[in-house]
Amino acid sequence: MADQDPNGKLWGGRFTESTDAFVEAFTASVDFDRRLYRYDIDGSIAHASMLAKIGVLSETERDAIVDGLQRIRGEIEAGDFEWSVAREDVHMNIEARLTALIGDAGKKLHTGRSRNDQVATDMRLYLRDEIDASVAELERLQRGLVDLAEREADTIMPGFTHLQVAMPVTFGHHLLAWFEMLERDRQRLKDCRRRMNVMPLGAAALAGTTYPIDRAYTAELLGFEAPAENSLDAVSDRDFAIEFTAAAALLMTHLSRCSEELILWTSAQFDFIDLPDRFCTGSSIMPQKKNPDVPELVRGKTGRVNGHLIGLLTLMKGQPLAYNKDNQEDKEPLFDTVDTLKGCLRVFADMVPAIEPKRDNMRRAARAGFSTATDLADYLVRKGVPFRDAHEIVGKAVRLGIDSGRDLAELELAALQALSPVIGEDVFEVLTLEGSVAARDHLGGTAPSQVRAAAQRARARLEI
């Protein structure tokens, strides 16, 4: 009863020979698109409800379809559903099983739609949920960063440019820089979700349908903002998949940058932080090793997601309107991007609150690199010395410190005054690490008071 021709294809009426066995397997997508089953069922239930509303289905037929689809959902979730490559994809597998369960009413479900608008709808429903799940994990990570930043608002570490010690900053300030990167990612994901939340269903194969369908009603049932405006675009558009993957690639790039810093900071050369053992592994030959495998793997997976973005862009670049079989190749990169992103966000959200800073080591490193040199230059400028002259004076002071093995704050006042007579006793207030960070007491600065205020604002932004 489920099949329309002897070869078992629901579309087989115009064909006179069976599909080649290899071609059948080569063109099938059911092995990977079956993960869309719940969205396919939700879309079909909404479609059946709409068909009943406009009189194409009787209420009895609608109820039989809904009950059958709910039974199929249960079979799939229990692992009792028999997937068939011969039926090509998730849609035809479910439809064939529905017809087997309820008879001719199942054959009426596809009235007024095509697999083209069906799969486009399924994918948007799927990705909508996955974006929500990714945003939830991202927000958990951001909250962990804010909590750690607030705790470490007074912890001094070196700030770097060119990976050379530049100025002292607080560890909390550095962590909030990560927060800002991730906040842009969060907004991009939310914006992507908003733009994606239009419904293709009702576009049918490419031109719409002759039935008096109520697309607004179906969209309301499925939680879409509105139906797609143009049927040709509705079935062929994959911008939403590309846009999500682009946002994911940028988010992964940010996680990779954070990973690189974590890897550096756990090295013996930096020794700024410790990661708990549960986020690390050892060596099969070197018993002393504790490897930061989690951030290393996140850094590596970034290339994977970047590759998926290029793949999707390349997939779409030469396609004419409307639907083409090429579009079957959109699912595996999208699915893997979703899985990779969620996994990386989850492990980062678990790991970040467990970071253990080594405060003394951070402070020692900040002192070792003459990180308050710019503060000395600013001090001279405030005393009336032109900045370029101040720059040269400080350079000579640094040279003196290098030659004598001392930090600027350890140089004698007389030695500093020999470089510039405007230098007084008050210079040592700006040459301390605490004085340096406290002096940058403005919005966006690294002063501990500003870090705490920024942490409070960050928490408030997460509620929006």
Image (cartoon, rainbow, N blue to C red):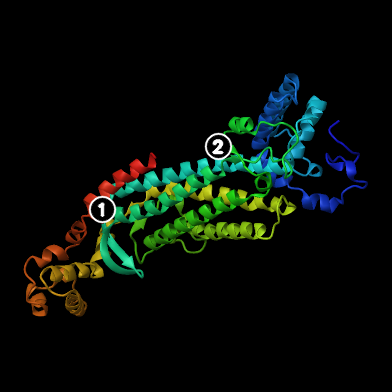
Q: Along the line of sight, which residue is nearer the eye, 337 or 357? A: 337
Q: Which of marks 1 and 2 precedes in the sequence?
A: 2
Could you say which is closer to the camera, residue 345 or residue 223? 223
Q: In which quadrant of the rendered view does residue 216 lie? A: top right
Taking the spot 74% from the left edge, 52% from the top edge, the residue there is 325
Compared to residue 369, the image places residue 212 above or below, namely above
Assign a secondary structure to mark 1: loop
Which residue matches tag 2?
A: 225
Residue at image coords 78%, 32%: 97
Q: In this view of the protein, which residue sits in the foreground, 393 or 206?
A: 206
Q: Are marks 2 and 1 in contact (CB under 8 Å)?
A: no
Amino acid type of the residue that numbered disc 2 sits on in the rendered structure = Glu
Q: Establish if 349 lies above or below 301.
A: above
In the image, taking residue 162 as reference, residue 385 lies left or right, namely: left
Residue 432 rendering spot, x and y as whole percentages = 17, 63
Q: Quadrant of residue 413?
A: bottom left
Q: Residue at x 68, y 24 (%)?
A: 53
User: Badge 1: few (under 14), some or many (20 or more) residues near its Cα, within 10 Å?
Assistant: few
Badge 1 is on which residue? 443
Q: Is residue 109 left or right of residue 340?
A: right
The kind of secondary structure element at disc 2 is: loop
CA–CA distance in space, label 2 to label 1: 38 Å
- Asked whether, in this view, residue 240 is left or right of residue 94, the answer is left
Residue type marked 1: Leu
Q: Quadrant of residue 365?
A: bottom left
Q: Is residue 91 visible?
A: yes
**Left or right placement of residue 193 versus residue 351 in this view:** right
User: Viewer-proximal residue, 60 or 133?
Assistant: 60
Give the number of marks: 2
Q: Residue 207, percent across and down?
A: 73, 43
Judged by depth in the image, the label closer to the viewer, 2 or 1, is 2
